[in-house]
Amino acid sequence: AMSASLVGSEMCIRDSTYLSDLASDLVLSTKEKESITTSINTLETRLISYFGNDIKEKFKFGSYTRGTILPRKVDNDSDIDYMIVFDNSNNYKPQTFLDRLKRFAEAKYSTSEIYQSSPTIVLELNNIKFELVPAYKNWNTYYIPNGNGGWMETNPNNFNSKLTEANNNNSYKIKPLVRLIKHWNVNVNYHDLTSYKIEERIAYNMTYSYYSCASYIDYAKRAFDELKKITYESSILNRINRAIERIDKALEYENDGMPYSALSEIKKVFPEV
């Protein structure tokens, strides 16, 4: 990305390919996708053989289905959300199904790391981590564990269309932007801002409000401003402000005819992978 970014003496941070190249580097490789597909197919086969008709539906959801999941080389906590919809005509509490999923995982994946991370069962394979989420469906509504022993409503893939809409309305820059911001989040080494909160804020609040943005730099500044609205944690706000300051510094260097210094500041926010 470095050579592409610095072609010609008139390299401009706003037009730089560094961030678009980086966003492209933050997608799963073909090999990773194939490996994950194999793991999902194996999981589905084993779920059917173990549970039979007790399972009404099963499907993946979350960032993997939206194309915003980060590769493991960037984020070791990358995982695939997988929903298993059970028959719950007996009105069981979530723990009943969590226990069942744990027994399933122990029976079918004895050598893997398996643990409950309320309210899911985590199945950690060599190539990927699965979050197995028990659910049941009543009419057209899905219910998943709320983390406090009860159930809560969800519409697991409803958010996907919202993110796609925001992406389509903004020159297809929103999904790459989400990956860049998540990459920043991992690199500052804290998880107070969860991946989902980042995606939700960027998609819901910025579907139409990017009218003045043209480049990834503009979009990133706007996204950081939005993220400040979802937290009161001073440590997080400080990190967000630091990112904004570095972007402003990069633009300042650029105006002063110092493209290498400008790119160096950008890399402090969004490091190379």
Image (spheres, rainbow, N blue to C red):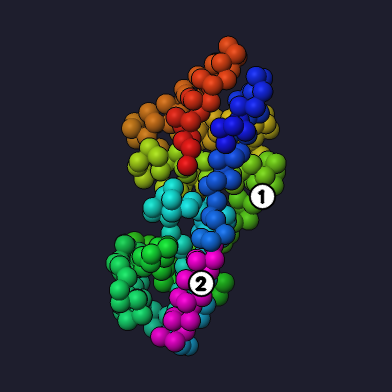
Task: Pinpoint residue 72: horizontal percent, then vertical percent.
Answer: 43, 54
Residue 59 place in picture, x, y as percent:
52, 71
Question: What's drawn in magenta, residue-wise?
Answer: 33-50
The picture places residue 263, in percent across and down from the top left corner, at 53, 25
Q: Could you tell me if residue 131 is visible in this image?
A: no
Q: Quadrant of residue 133?
A: bottom left
Assess whether residue 165 is covered by the magenta stretch. no
Could you tell me which residue is drawn at 59 percent across and 45 percent down? 24
* Mark 2 residue element: helix
Could you classify mark 1 by the number of other residues whose Cα lies within 10 Å: few (under 14), some (14-19), or many (20 or more)?
some
- Residue 236 seen anywhere in this rendered image of the structure: yes
49 to the left or right of 222: left
Disc marking residue 140: none
Expressed as whole percent of the image width and height from the top left, the position of residue 270 reads 48, 35
| Structural distance between the alpha carbons of marks 1 and 2 | 30 Å
Which residue is more in the foreground, 49 or 163?
Answer: 49
- Tag 1 residue: 165
What amino acid is found at the position of numbered circle 1 in the picture? Glu
Query: Which is the main secondary structure of the residues drawn in magenta?
Result: helix
Q: Residue at x 48, y 37 (%)?
A: 272
